[in-house]
Amino acid sequence: MAALAVDALRKAYSGTEVVAGLSFAVAPGTCFGLLGPNGAGKTTTLRLCLGLTAPDAGTIALAGRAIPADAQQARARVGVVPQFDNLDPDFTCAENLLVFGRYFGLKDADIRARIPQLLDFAGLAGKADARIATLSGGMKRRLTLARALVNDPDIVFLDEPTTGLDPQARHLIWERLKQLKAAGKTLILTTHFMDEAERLCDTLIVIDHGRKIAEGSPRQLIAEHIEPQVVEVFDEAGGRLAGFVENHRDLAERLETSGDTAFFYCREPRPLLARLTEADGLRYVHRASNLEDVFIKLTGRELRD
Amino acid sequence: MRPSPHSAPGWFPVWQRNFLVWRKLALPSILGNLADPLIYMLGLGYGLGAMLPSIDGRPYVAFLAAGTVCASTMNAATFEALYSSFSRMHVQKTWDAILNTPLGLADVVAGELFWAATKSLFSGAAILVVIAGLGLAHGPLALWALPAIVLTGLAFAALGLIWNALAPSYDFFMYYFTLFITPMTLISGVFFPTDQLPGWLATVGAWLPLAQGVALVRPLLAGEIPADALIHIMALLATAGVAFVIALRLTRRRLLK
């Protein structure tokens, strides 16, 4: 049985379909990524899955329960790390965990027994009595993660868990999420960081305008949707790029330009690289394609606000 | 560790959360709630009261004391259900965090209702203690003012939560005070007997929830059983119940759409 199964889900706000016939399933014990540009319908999808808003059509089963009918029972088995920290500023770290555990009907003694281990997991040992205002952004995120685990959930929803964190804090969160997966938990993740999705997700879907536009493992998606190599060419001197692109566009399977940068997507980059070593005023980077290239190919380069 | 089934009602941990915050800031909170109404009561009661005839055979300060208990109860419940609930709902997003747990919106709003009523009880009871100390409360019947305070607090907490559900920002609450709370305070018999008012205004006033609370508390403090007690009790309960249902619906529309 899937940890989360969504079928033909629809939700419209004042006539605009935000989720437009979305279907996917998340296997237990895996990390599932929900990717898409701003306004693609990710947050609405998460809210629908948690039973915080009712769908117009379609079915959702979370932890084996029908949503939204049995959402409260389902949420007993779920932890949520929201996009924006909503820790209780009036409480210490330990009090935040205690108060949150009570919402799950847990006994104070049981929660208190669990607090040291939760703080330890979050790298906040010794911070039990620290006030929230004294914590760094990374510490708050980790405490929010610990809070989401207070009920020992089977499924953890993470809505952009590392947005706004420095690289050190981000790596620590990734480490912890891998540990959770190793412990058998199902992770459902939204993120704008494609390297994060590539590292953590077993499967992911890309949605745009409320529809699924791709599905698979990060490797599958890269193999399926895009040439394996990219050469990014930057105009350093000014004015040389257009001519170079014009003369060499047949050396790549696909070409994209964005401002002063041209992206040559190729299967065989050597001829192009040979030309670039001879070219003046152009700088270039040769790399393997990644999930970000797939994402941009699928959703376009235009800004989404 | 697996969660045990809920032994307490769902609103209780929400109430408990607010109580824990209050406990940390209890002393300034009590003093703040107490000082303002007491200054008015003593200043007007003894100062202005010295120039006034007695009302129903008792000094003006005793009349005003009963009104002050009810007005403070109303204000405490209203402030909590407006400013404090709005902070938790809209600014701190505490309600959003709670809604990610097995608790539902009804638990959250009920927790806020009972908490605001609890705060109004603290406030009303503290003033009651001062009144008793001044010898302005008579006999054991005065203790029955406590449940009357709770009922008044519940009614105003529920009414406040309606306005909270509609509020775009803190500024919106000013309208509630200037359009509803302040005029009501003046026509509900807090400062002067309502027979001083034009007949129609006195009739309107008598239907308002603050007047229902005053009609219970004033006789109780004088050591008398209130006339039509059951009607006033039912009116306050009905106000609380109906307002809660409306507040819950409006909050659901606001947060869970």
Image (tube, helix red, strand yellow):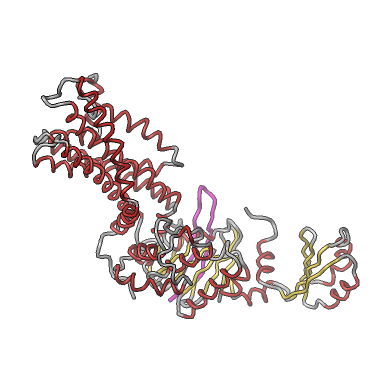
B193 w.r.t. A118: above or below: above
- Nearest the viewer among B72 and B45 is B45
Left or right of B48 on screen, residue A5: right
Magenta stretch contains residue A144: no
Query: Which quadrant would residue A246 be assigned to in this image?
Result: bottom right
User: Which percent across, then down, holds residue B22?
Assistant: 33, 52
Res. B240 in view: no
> Which residue is at the far bottom?
A182
Name the quadrant of the N terminus of chain B: bottom left
Query: Which quadrant would residue B215 be assigned to in this image?
Result: top left
Res. B217 in view: yes
User: Which percent across, then down, holds residue A245?
Assistant: 85, 64
Q: Residue at x 81, y 76 (%)?
A: A269
| Magenta highlight: main SS | strand
- Nearest the viewer among A207 and A90 is A90
Range covered by the magenta-colored residues: A1-24
